[in-house]
Image (cartoon, grey):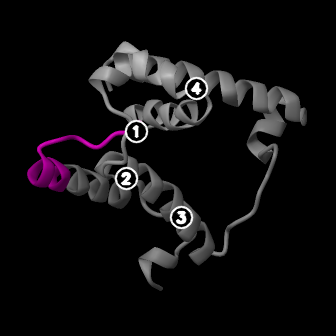
Amino acid sequence: MNVLLQKKWSPYIAGALAGLLLVLSVYLTGKYFGASTTFVRASGFIEQTVAPEKVAEMAYFIKEKVKVDWQFLFVVGVFFGSLLSAWTSRDAKAVAVPPMWEERFGASRTKRWTMAVLGGAVLMFGARLADG
């Protein structure tokens, strides 16, 4: 069976491929791949549509222009790549509360989504704090 069509990849193979992609990224662009800057820029895109004069005044966006670059396209590629992976493995299904979460914390969607948003905010804060 083709490795791309398997439901689960070996974490060793996936890790090795991610490592090779990182080396290739540094070799070709001189930069590490990441996502936190892209999320800040995406919020800048949204904010520009609502209040463009405010974005033009922000010190961060004076230094880091709101733009589509290789990193933005990398994040878009991760999104569509994950959709393609789920589709090709025939494992694509939307689940509001995963079984593992339900066993441990209950079936509350509100609790699940609240913790997901809080966890994402803490993760993004840490990544931005580390200049990532």
Residue 35 higher or lower than 2, as above or below: above
Magenta stretch bounds: 23-35
Disc 2 marks a residue whose amino acid type is Phe
Residue at the spot 22% in from the left edge and 40% down from the top edge: 32
Q: Position of residue 93 (x, y in %)?
A: 75, 63
Q: CA distance from mark 2 to mark 1?
A: 8 Å
Residue beneath the point at 42% across and 61% down:
10
Is residue 116 left or right of 57 when viewed as pictured? right
Q: Quadrant of the C terminus?
A: top left
**Marker disc for residue 92:** none
Q: Earlier in the sequence, mark 2 or mark 4?
A: 4
Q: Quadrant of residue 102?
A: top right
**Residue 74, numbered circle:** 2
- Circle 3 crowding by C-alpha within 10 Å: few under 14, some 14–19, many from 20: few
Assign a secondary structure to mark 1: loop
Which residue is found at the position 77% from the left and 46% from the top?
Answer: 98
The part of the image, by quadrant, that contains residue 84 is: bottom right
Q: Secondary structure at mark 3?
A: loop
Q: Which numbered tag is attached to residue 8?
A: 3
- Mark 4 lies on a secondary structure that is loop
Pick the residue in front: 99 or 75. Answer: 75
Q: Residues within 10 Å of mark 4 (few under 14, many from 20)?
A: few
Spot occupied by residue 124 in the image (x, y as percentages of width and height): 49, 24
Which residue is more in the foreground, 64 or 71? 64
> Is residue 72 covered in magenta?
no
